[in-house]
Image (spheres, rainbow, N blue to C red):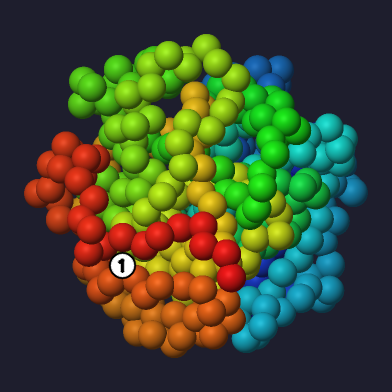
Amino acid sequence: MLKKKCKLGRYRFGYMSILVILSTVTMIYQMNKFELVTSLISQLNYKTELQDIQRKEFSSHALNPVKTAGRQLKNKPNIFNANLTLSQWDSRHLFKFLDSVLSGDKFVELSNKYDVCLATQGSLEKLHSLVSVTENWSGPVSVSVFTADLLEHRNPKTVELISNKLLYPQNHLRNHARRNCQTKYVYLTDIDIIPSTGMADNLQEFLRQSRCEKLCAYVIPVYEIDKNVSFPQNKYQITNFAKEGLARPFHQMIYVNGHYSTNYKMWEDNTRDVQDAVHVNHNVTKCAGWYEPFYVAHAATPDFDERFIGYGFTRNTQVYEMIAAGYQFQVLSPIFSCHWGLQNITEVYNPWRKKQVFMNSRLITTFKSEIDARHRNVAQFPALPLHADSRQTRSDWRTQIPATQTLELGRIP
């Protein structure tokens, strides 16, 4: 199994750094490094340097992205800087890490210019999402990419099938992406979460003026949007999409408790700030169940627990510890992020993923007792279903927070 990681500061390869995460190392040292990087680059042939090569050297029907990338790499012998024997193990010797395999020439400059870095992670077949992400994000980006034993497969459907049957190490990748950011703040996302236009610059102004009185995490609302609409350019457009049923809060029909407490209705009801600078719209005062927002926070937030591998209780256990440590979650406006496609539970929760959620749920009792002992500040979360009831209506989800499923936030030891 092989995993890869890259840092990006826009969408040109000249700005990219790649880092690698390895697990089982059978035959790994015999792996051809040239083939490794050309496989990665072939996945990024949309609006990248490969597209430039296509226009200059080939007709669109004749381009072979792997061979073309190979020609370019042969002319740049130092572009791939990896010594697979100098990797580092994780704490349980399940995965290995390689840093700065491919370093972008703009990453350091952008890290000095901005106070916030976008840290993200994804699997190989989703690398194309980086194009949309970096078109809207002008700051530094650290990306952790899972590749497993996919280098032999060029068919995207084959890659997707294999990825779905592996235990995807989300929290390892998240930690690795965050640690390779060089900024004071980190905006942690998934690779297919696309920030609103100009977010890096807008956040920069806010963060330099913010005066957080204690530990703060700034929640950025994330919407699923219909694949047939254009990407919303501002808050006015995304709220209109929501009213028309063309957008809805992230994972509304998959895991309702994950973003319940962000209170999208309060965010949407504030229609007077569309042209305003980034500001705190409201505080999250009560947490419903296992809260898992996408947020911007200081880089020194707690690590993600790497015992949770695969799907289920990965992001929300980290937020659980943040709540225990006394973090205050504040929802920002008018910025937001989007995910293409209105997801439903039947598409996402296949039997394999349900099994992973169940396996991770067996670790929860131990995890909660450890967090309680570490911080001595956490109320017990109630027992909750593993996913949302897809029959629950949008209005029910957005306006009603059962009192029996709430947790007071921001308590200080």
Give the vertical position of 70 relative to 47 (above or below): below
| Residue drawn 84% across the image and 74% down it | 86
Q: How many marks?
A: 1
Binning the other alpha carbons within 10 Å of mark 1 as few (below 14), some (14 to 19) or many (20 upward) gives some
Direction left: furthest residue: 391
Q: Nearer the viewer, residue 70 or 381?
A: 381
Name the amino acid, label 1. Arg
Place residue 262 in its image quadrant: top left
Residue 147 percent location from the top left of the image: 56, 60
Q: Is residue 214 above or below residue 246?
A: below
Image spot of residue 300 (x, y percent): 71, 60
Disc 1 marks which residue? 353
Q: Toward which corner of the image does residue 43 lie, by quadrant?
A: top right
Q: Residue at x 34, y 26 (%)?
A: 268
Q: Which quadrant of the structure image shows residue 178?
A: bottom right
Could one spot residue 347 in this view of the protein? no
**Tag 1 secondary structure:** helix
- In the rendered image, residue 377, in percent from the top left (x then y), is placed at 51, 73
Q: Quadrant of the N terminus?
A: bottom right
Of residue 47 and residue 222, the one placed in the foreground of this image is 222
Q: Position of residue 410 (x, y in %)?
A: 51, 57
Indicate whether 67 appears above or below 21: above
Q: At x 82% / y 76%, what residue is drawn?
A: 85
Q: Is residue 114 visible?
A: yes
Q: Where's the C terminus, which quadrant?
A: bottom right
